[in-house]
Amino acid sequence: MSPASRASFVTCLGCGCACDDLTVQIADGRIADISPPCPVGRAWFGDGRVPGRILRGGAEVALEAALADAAETLAGARGGVLVLLAPDLSTQGQRAALAVADLLCATVDTATSGPAAAGLLAAQRRGRAAATLGEVRNRADVLLFWGVDPGPRYPRFLSRYALDPVGTHVTRGRAGRTVISVDIGRDRGPAGAESALVLAPDQEIAALSVMRAVALGNALGELPPALQAAADAAARLTTAAYAVLVHDGEPGEEPGRDAYRAEGLIALEYLGDETVTVAAGTFECHKFRYSDEDAGFVSKDGAHPTYDVWVTADEDSIFVKGGVGGYMQTWYELVELER
């Protein structure tokens, strides 16, 4: 038996918190425990064992024989190889895999490309505002958790960065911070927030659009309760010294959310009320205009033409008619309605 030992100030990559203050307890050559305790970190470290068997065609072989066989196979497929990087691959392992891919003119992908694709594409089209974990800890006085509770996936986020710690610009810790929690279907925000919003998945893009409109100072008319709550939350964000919107880059529990919801952040302008007659009847309507001046959507020769939309002036906000002009010239209207 080997003597027990410990390693201090160890970094954990089990989640995005990247905690670097862990102590790892080692006994009999295996990881026995970590502290501070964290279920995600404990699962990520495991017991330190590495695979002890090398298989080729289901049979055990020597390492040298397996490497020679792999090298022969890869060399014969030069130009047609996909190198897939595993989630828990070390930095050194990634470096070696990329070197092999370079030699083979291979395509490289990662196991997280699918979940991260929507956010990456949105960032390419619109840009992205971000903050370091240190800025969140030291500066954030208003935090909006958008459909994510850090507790299950990022157990130490709240205690280490977001809510409890005393920051250089938030000297009262939790008492100096305002928390807004947003539930989107089954994706819940944290408990204990000063303000809470509950949205159905099909309300998410509308809520984001309303919030952006508030941030831009656009006028809004009467809104359904859920969207009015989103507008109020956006107004609170605009008064913060340092506002932070926390969301999860990984898929949550709610399957009904739009994977490209980041593209819902378009400008919304309220243009007043009108009486509108369509095939389904005559309705009192709110009129809104959606615009995309940054040309984030696929567009031609600059900004996308504006959309004009009429919805019923009641809590249902039923689409009555709408369309887009410019080079698109596309219009829709309600032809039948049963209540």
Image (tube, helix red, strand yellow):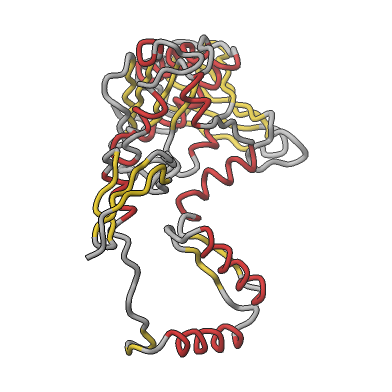
Determine whether 40 is above or below 136 in the image: below
Q: How many marks?
A: 0
Residue 12 visible to the viewer: yes
Q: Position of residue 240 (x, y in %)?
A: 51, 12
Give the image quarter of residue 50: bottom left
* Residue nearer the viewer, 336 or 37: 37
- Is 283 on the left-hand or right-hand side of 155? right
Q: Position of residue 128 (x, y in %)?
A: 60, 34
> Residue at the location (60% across, 68% down)?
107
Residue 283 visible to the viewer: no
Give the image quarter of residue 52: bottom left
> Residue at the location (26% across, 24% down)?
191
* Residue nearer the viewer, 276 or 41: 41
Q: Which residue is farthest front?
A: 3
* Quarter in which the N terminus is drawn: bottom left
Q: Position of residue 212 (x, y in %)?
A: 54, 22
* Residue nearer the viewer, 186 or 51: 51
> Residue at the location (60% across, 66% down)?
98
- Is 149 on the left-hand or right-hand side of 322? left
Determine whether 260 is above or below 87 in the image: above
> Residue at the location (60% across, 29% down)?
307
* Quarter in which the C terminus is drawn: top left
- Is 49 on the left-hand or right-hand side of 90? left
Determine whether 27 is above or below 288 in the image: below
Q: Which residue is farthest right?
A: 301
* Residue nearer the viewer, 53 or 214: 53
Q: Position of residue 239 (x, y in %)?
A: 52, 9
- Is 120 on the left-hand or right-hand side of 9? right
